[in-house]
Amino acid sequence: MVLVYILTTLTTAAWIVRMISERKFVFRRTILDIPLLIFIASQLISTIFSMDPRTSWLGYYSRFNGGMFSVICYALLYWAYVSNLDRKSTLITIRYFLASAVLVSVYGILEHFGIDKRLWVQDVQSRVFSTLGQPNWLAAWIVALIPITWAIAILNKTKKIIPYLLSVLFFVVLLFTGSRSGLLGFAAADGIFWLYVLAKFKKKFIKPFVICNLAFVILCLIFGTEVTPGIYRLITHSSNQQINQSAPSGTALETGGTESGTIRQIVWKGALQVWLHYPVFGTGVETFAYSYYLYRPAEHNLTSEWDFIYNKAHNEFLNMAANSGTFGLLSYLVLIGFTIYIFIKNRKDLLAISLFSGYMGLLVTNFFGFSVVPTELEFFLFPAIAVSLAISEKPSVVSKTKNKTVQKILIFITLIATGYLLITIVNYWRADYLYAQGRSYNSIKRPDIATKYLTQAIGLEPAEPLYREELASSYVSLALTLNQQKDTNDANQFASAATSEIEKAESLSPANVILKRTEYGVFMNLAGLNSDYLVNARDTLIAAVALAPTDAKLHYYLGLTYARIGQVDLSLKTLAETIALKSDYQDARDAYAIILKAEKSAK
């Protein structure tokens, strides 16, 4: 996301400098302008009224994509593209798309054969993700690009073998992702492209149709899919059986947890409730991680991912509805509708049809997942490419006349502003780097070093609650260590600093339930120094439960805290509520039995 910020800044600056140098407004009007402005307006209003404005501007931390700033960047890239590039330069752009896909795909195949299996907790050989971080993201990205190879195969009168090979390469990687949504998206893209080609050109292109689809069928028979075993899988199954019997690693879904479709239905139900309760503008762009807890269905507690954090609805359309309300969802659908119109308008160009097919495949994968930076770039740039394919004229050449003083001043101001933005973005990245360093040192029990990095991170981004949260954890560790060394005075000072930092973090993001969990942990750890902190822990959990009424773990912690304070009746009541929320919660049942037995013995 940071790279997108930097490249958008540089691209926009170059565009502005060009306009100043040519002394004219360089902007090509397209039918997508008004829908895009309406969509931006919907996201801006949602951001203004957000339950967590910082998250809405920058995106959920660790996700980042989807925040207001990213939407602005994608829109600027669209307008910069259509205003400055023609068909010739667009064809070069497509080559870059495919070249990058080749690199990603080759690494994905090497990953399937174990090149980096020791680096990941996940079983990357079963479900590759190459350089994109997650199998479904790789599948969505590659699905959108595959139809381009078909168009090139048809249009190329020579060297047809290359696009066919690219198509095979990309499809193999798609199979190796093990993504069902990817296969559904591919089926949509394949159907749309070839139905149009066969309907438009009749029998003229029956040969490439047969070659491509026969190759895909053969590859499915060899490598298999998520629903059909392949020859390769059957052969290797027996040799891998002993390995698979070892302790599993990875996420619950990868190790036999609750079926992903079941979990998605539960999350979608919660997303619908968020939308129904915030129907107009939603809870704020990218705030699903906070709003979902308010309406999280109780049955989520009975899944293998019951204590996972869900910061996306795993359905781009429901995610949009929950975060941006009806206005946001409708503007998003209108944007999609006009984008489809652009493709259909340019349907005489087979490349435009391939982009349309890939775009529709992308929408299918987004229905079962969510967009990330690479797929979002495809979402916004595919229509820009389709528009530019219809532009045959070359961009106007910059005037050779010397720039006047006013122009020089304007260019200088543009460069200064660009420099300032780049420094701001780099400092934003540096803060994240320092934060990561601080977390690393905390993980190896070196809070003394961690505090130095985290303090620097806060100096660069004082409004980021996660940095203060991590610094509070460092201070807690230092306080506990000093208390063990009988240095009570310094221990109390660090304890006070920890409570100050975590309270500042909480005030910066009051709707963040995950942050309240950490706040509770801070107070519980400090209770070893002063039992008064137990009251703070209790009050924090009460506030957290109000924001997450169906979270069984928070109820469990609250029940234990009530017991430690001596409020036994409330403890038993809360633990009973916990068991009602999650009937298979053995820790809660054990705690309830122990406390109840102790209470009866006391009487």
Image (cartoon, rainbow, N blue to C red):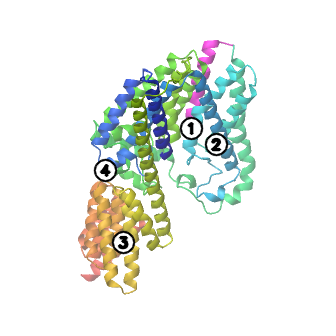
Label 4 sits on a secondary structure element that is helix
Mark carried by residue 104? 2
Q: Earlier in the sequence, mark 4 or mark 3?
A: 4
Contact flag, marks 1 and 2 (Cβ < 8 Å)? yes
The verdict on residue 202 being magenta is yes
Give the residue number, with chain letter if any, for mark 1. 141
Residue 141 on image: x %, y %: 56, 37
Circle 2 sits in a helix, a strand or a loop, which is it? helix
Task: Give the foreground label among 1 and 2.
Answer: 2
Q: Disc 1 versus disc 3: distance between alpha carbons?
A: 48 Å
Name which residue lies at 70% across and 56% down.
241
Give the mark, 1 or 4, whose residue is nearer the N terminus.
1
- Secondary structure under tag 1 reads helix
Residue bearing the label numbered 3: 591
Over which residues does the magenta segment extend?
Answer: 181-203
Among numbered discs 4 and 2, the one appearing first in the sequence: 2
Q: Position of residue 384 (x, y in %)?
A: 50, 26
Mark 4 to mark 3: distance in Å?
26 Å
Q: Which residue is mark 4?
A: 294
Q: In this rendered view, identify the residue nearer to me: 265 or 81.
A: 81
Q: Earlier in the sequence, mark 2 or mark 3?
A: 2
Cβ atoms at labels 1 and 4 below 8 Å apart: no
